[in-house]
Amino acid sequence: MKKTISLVLAISILMLSLLALTACAGDGAPVGMKLIRGSDSIGYYIYGPEEWVIANQENYGIACSYVSKLDNSSVTLVEADMPEVAIPEYFAKELQSYPENFEVKPEAEIKECSFGNASKAYKAIFNYKYGSYEYRSMQIYSIFENRFYIFTYNAPLTSYDAETTYYDNYLEKVDAIITNVKFVSKADGEAPAQPEYEKDADGYRLVSNKAIAGFDLYLPDTYTVDWSTSMVSATRADGSNITLSEATSTQVTAEDYWKSRFEQLELIADDVKAVDGTKLGVDLGGNLDAASLEFTYKLCGKDYHVYQVLIVNGFKGYVFTFTAEEANFADLLEEAKTILYKTEF
C-alpha cells in the first residue's frame, strides 16, 4: 500500500531508531552486495553492501540499510503518492516541513538523473543540522509504471579521515546501490508465511532469540512483529508500538539517559515533557534493577505518550519502550506492562 511519506518523517524514523538487524544476501544480488528489500509484490529490488546493516521499517514500507551502530550513514527507499505538482515544487514544499532549527539548505537545483531502470528520476541534494551535527542528504525521486519512489542517502558531513567526509566516503557504494535498483511490474501473490512461535501458558508468543537479543520476549496476538534480531519491534493495529533492545549508553544514570533522550527528541518533536518523573526500583524480579519514566510529545500533529523502562542485568542494560497515541495509552498500558513482566533476561 502506498503511503504519504514526508522527508522529515522518513528521517525522524531513522533518528529515533537504534537498530541492529542483519539479513542474508538475496538471490540475484550483485557481487559484494545483498538484498535489502524486494519482491515482485512490492514492485522493486534494492541491494546494498554486504557489510551494512538492514533495518527495514515494514510498517511504513521503507527499505533501509545503514553502515553500523557507530555510523548512521544510511540509505532508504519508499513508495509514495505521486505528486500533483512538478518535482521541484514538491521538493521545495517538503523542505518547508522541517523544523527551523534543522537549518535546511539546498545545495543545488534538482537535476534529471538515472536510478536503476526507472523511466524518469530527479536528484536533489541538501544539507541540514541535527543538534550540533551537520548532515547531507541526496534524494532521488523516481517514476516507474506510474509509481513514485523516494530514495534517500543520508550521512554526516563530519570528517571520516583527513581527506574526506562520511558523506563523500560512501558515495561509491551508494552509486552501486543506485545503479542496481530494479523495478518490476507488481504481481499479486500470497502473503509470506508467518513464523511458528513457541507459546507460553497464556498463549503469548516467544518472538526473540535470547542468544542473539539477550532476552526472551513474549507477545500476545494483538501485536505483529516488525522485526526480531538483536532488537525487537512489534506494533498493534492502532499503531501502538513496543521495542526492546540492549542499551547503547550504559555508563550514565537514568536521569542523564532521559535528559539526552529528550534533547534528541526535541529536535524533531514538540512539547516533550515528563509526566510524573523517574520511578526507581521497578520490580521485575530476579537480580534486575530498573527505572521507569512516562513522557509525552507531539510529532506530525499527533500527541504521543511513552512508557519507558531502563533495565540493568549484570553488566548489560536494556531499554523497553511502549509508545501509543495519547487517546490509546491508558487502555493499553497494562497490556504493555504484562509484556515487560513476562520478559526473561
Image: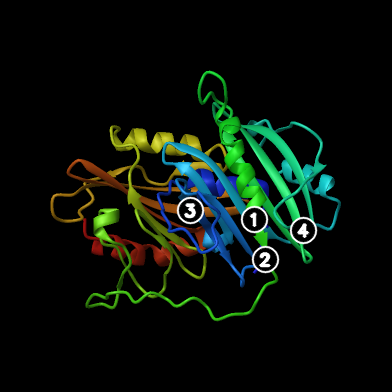
Mark 1 or 4: the one toward you: 1
- Which residue is drawn at the image coordinates 52% and 78% (left, top)? 191
- Which residue is drawn at the image coordinates 74% and 61% (left, top)? 81
Mark 3 or 4: the one toward you: 4
Instruction: Give the SS element for disc 3.
Output: loop
How many other residues sit within 10 Å of disc 4, few (<14), some (14-19) or many (≥20)?
Answer: some
Q: CA distance from mark 2 to mark 4?
A: 14 Å
How many other residues sit within 10 Å of disc 2, few (<14), some (14-19) or many (≥20)?
Answer: some
Q: CA distance from mark 1 to mark 2?
A: 19 Å
Marker disc for residue 262: none
Amino acid tagged 4 = Ile
Amino acid tagged 3 = Ala
Report the quarter where the N terminus lies.
bottom right
First along the sequence among labels 1 and 4? 4
Q: CA distance from mark 3 to mark 1?
A: 17 Å
Tell me the residue that label 3 is attached to: 55
For the image, the number of numbered tags is 4
Marker disc for residue 2: 2
Question: Between 185 and 140, which is closer to the camera in this rendering?
Answer: 185
**Chosen colour scheme:** rainbow
Instruction: Give the SS element for disc 2.
Output: loop
Tell me the residue that label 1 is attached to: 181
Tell me the residue that label 4 is attached to: 143
Question: Between 131 and 256, which is closer to the camera in this rendering?
Answer: 131
Q: Is residue 128 above or below residue 85?
A: above
How many other residues sit within 10 Å of disc 1, few (<14), some (14-19) or many (≥20)?
Answer: some
Question: Circles 3 and 2: CB distance less than 8 Å?
Answer: no
Q: For residue 241, which quarter of the picture? A: bottom left
First along the sequence among labels 3 and 1? 3
First along the sequence among labels 2 and 4? 2
